[in-house]
Image (tube, rainbow, N blue to C red):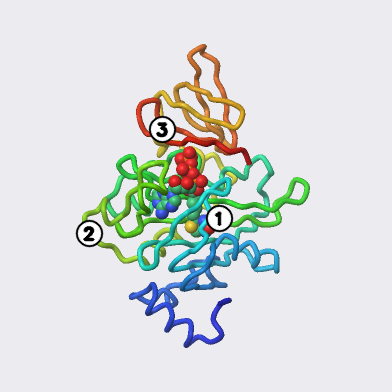
Amino acid sequence: MKGFPTEERRSTIIWHMLDDRGLRDRLPIGWIGVDFYYHESIGSTNAEAIQLAESGAPHGTLVLADAQTAGKGRAGRRWITNPGTALAFSLILRPSNLGIDQWLILFGLGALSVAEALSEIGLQPEIKWPNDVLIDGKKVAGILVNSNWTGESVNYSVLGIGLNVSPEAIPDDAELDFPATSIGEALGRSINRTDLLIAILKKLKVLFQQVNSSDLSNAWQDRLAYLNQEVVVKKADGTVTGRLIGLTANGELKLIEKSGNETVIGYGDVSLRPIEGGEKRKHISSQ
Ligand code: ATP
Ligand code: BTN
């Protein structure tokens, strides 16, 4: 299903599948969701948003699904979105002044928007660099950014966010290489998905204005999991251990190794873990 043929169709589907408080009436949030597509079930909202962007869909186009059958994580990994339990959406961004060395900041934009929205409902989220939001040390949300460049300038980026809302969203242990949780489990009560989505979109709208400022990387850094702790970072070409000391202005990770050397780690299929516990990944692939 692509979009909604009529206004009536749009409101009916949303009422039944996701919304009980009039999502349609609450969009757009500024430039976000002027163009809005809802799918009861889809392969991947990121894949769909990429197709829309390739066809010229504008900045702010929003693709939302109740369930995904082929949700994507990084490096071809899977993201599970069970029906009726989660938020899964993708936002097309056409940033006018984002340099090729700055695109990592879009992970921060997504993670921080989720974290700030969750803070407002009384949770204490942390961000596991680069793309996971944790509550009580467990993963509650993941961010995936796909970008398309010509030379040094970005044509479009797709910012995808998956968030476990109710406990039924959490995949079986066999699917997980890191512990997972849900908002419902963390809060001890259920929460309205539409309210949560709107809260995140409002944060995205505000924080997007900061993608070129150190304010965003500073706020991201303030919420980093394992800050000032010993961590191990697994990369395709080896492992780095050291104390996590923060982020560069572009959102790269800074570590101090035992030797005293400062190392900066950029984007790749990197896997960050605290030194004690948590490590279950058996296979690291490059991308
Ligand atoms: P790392 O933690 O090493 O940085 P990652 O585990 O975050 O990497 P990603 O590609 O970022 O890897 O995320 C995909 C992974 O998330 C999957 O391999 C699976 O382990 C886990 N996962 C899939 N669906 C969910 C979900 N709904 N909730 C929590 N975790 C999930
Ligand atoms: C990760 O932790 O690797 C990132 C997971 C990102 C999942 C979201 S759900 C909405 C969007 N569509 C996808 O296929 N992936 C992202």
Among the two numbered marks 2 and 1 on one chain, the one whose residue lies closer to the N terminus: 1
Question: Which residue appears at 51% of the width and 39% of the height?
Answer: 217
Q: In the displayed structure, does residue 247 sit left or right of residue 135? A: right
Determine which residue is flagged by label 3. 279
Establish if 38 lies above or below 210.
below
Determine which residue is flagged by label 2. 189
Among the two numbered marks 3 and 2 on one chain, the one whose residue lies closer to the N terminus: 2
Q: In the displayed structure, does residue 273 sit left or right of residue 237? A: left
Mark 3 vs mark 2, foreground winner is: 3
Which kind of residue does numbered mark 3 sit on? Glu
Q: In the displayed structure, does residue 188 sit left or right of residue 227? A: left
Where residue 8 appears, x then y in whole percent?
47, 88
Which quadrant of the figure contains the C terminus? top right
Label 1 – label 3 distance at C-alpha: 27 Å
Which quadrant of the figure contains the N terminus? bottom right
Q: Are marks 3 and 2 in contact (CB under 8 Å)?
A: no
Label 2 – label 1 distance at C-alpha: 28 Å
Establish if 245 lies above or below 93.
above
Q: Nearer the viewer, residue 144 or 83?
A: 83
Residue at the left extreme of this rendering: 188
Question: Which residue appears at 52% of the width and 36% of the height?
Answer: 283
